[in-house]
Image (spheres, grey):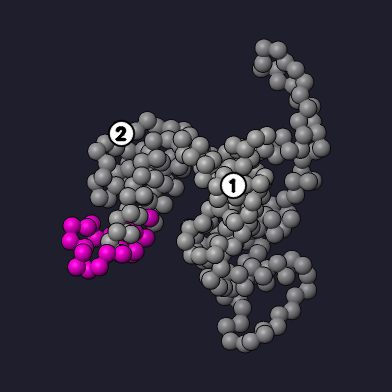
Amino acid sequence: MYLRNVLEIACDGMERATQQERFQTLIGTYPELQPLCDPALLSHTPSKGQVYAVNSLFALLGLELALYFRQDKQRIARCDYCWLYFIPKTRKETHYCDRKTDGFPCKQRGSRFKRNLDAEQDEALLACKRLRDRMYARMLRYTIALPENRQGLIPVDYMEYDAWSENARLARIDYLDGKLTGEEFLRKIDTMHDLDDYTVDEAQAPPADTVWQRMVARNIGFDPEMHYPEAVMQLDLGSDDPQWQTCSADDLRRRDQDGHQSLREKYGKK
């Protein structure tokens, strides 16, 4: 229960974050974990076979987190398709695991369903994706070209691409939070003037977090098995022909997770 909620806060949607950013997000949500999982509190003296002592399962969780946050060779990510956690094999941003779900590779199904998700996004976010793809392509062309073959190429190296990506990430957050209009968002990220027009149809931004995410963030001990009843009866008096409906625990959970769920659950066959 505790580990599930910790992973949801520190690893879900954090694929582009550094270990320090993951740690800060976690203790910002659960301050009570800081004295247990702060990597700065671990001994920095090199010692093969270092031995640690803990007096509870909760303290053991904190120690494992501290050891995890101290290193940056491995990270935990969440598969966008099956919603299970995994350790990416490379440092490259990875959104799908190597598992098979329902007989299909998550990478295969995830990529297909991701196109459905993109089609639902507003114009500004789609333009941002196009700009990101262009910047990444420029960076690849420039960095793999020999120095004598770089004439005529737009000089975008790894550092410039990373700086652009960070600027776009922060601008995207501000846009989704309503601090920037679509036009302001695009002007801020179109540093190479690729776009001819910054006018976009304003779309309603998705909620910053769902009911489910708020419940997890409020309580590290949040347990859906205890929170949701086995079934409830609901009557929609706003409909033309009100009928009693039975909602299962899964129905209630999906309602609270709506807007933040796996691609499999969102687009897969029910």
Which element is circle 1 on? Answer: loop
Task: Give the class, few, some or many, for how many residues have Cα within 10 Å of label 2's Cα (few <14, many ≥20).
Answer: few
Looking at the picture, tell me which residue is in the foreground, 112 or 15: 112
Please give the residue where the numbered disc 1 appears in the rendered image. 81
Residue at image position (48%, 65%) is 91
Q: Which mark is residue 199?
A: 2
Quadrant of the image for the C terminus?
A: top right
Instruction: Point out the stretch of residues depicted in magenta.
Output: 144-165
Is 157 positioned to the left or the right of 239 in the image?
left
Looking at the picture, tell me which residue is in the foreground, 31 or 181: 181
Residue at image position (80%, 38%) is 229
146 magenta-colored: yes
Is 150 positioned to the left or the right of 267 in the image?
left
Residue at image position (24%, 60%) is 155
Q: In this view, does 59 lie above or below 52?
A: above
Choose mark 2 or mark 1, whichever is in front. 1
Q: Is residue 29 above or below residue 117?
A: below
Task: Give the class, few, some or many, for how many residues have Cα within 10 Å of label 1's Cα (few <14, many ≥20).
Answer: many
The Cα–Cα distance between marks 2 and 1, rounded to whole angstroms, is: 33 Å
Is 98 positioned to the left or the right of 219 in the image?
left
Q: What residue type is labelled 1?
A: Tyr
Quadrant of the image for the N terminus?
A: bottom right
Residue at image position (70%, 59%) is 3
Which element is circle 2 on? Answer: loop
Q: In this view, does 31 lie above or below 258?
A: below
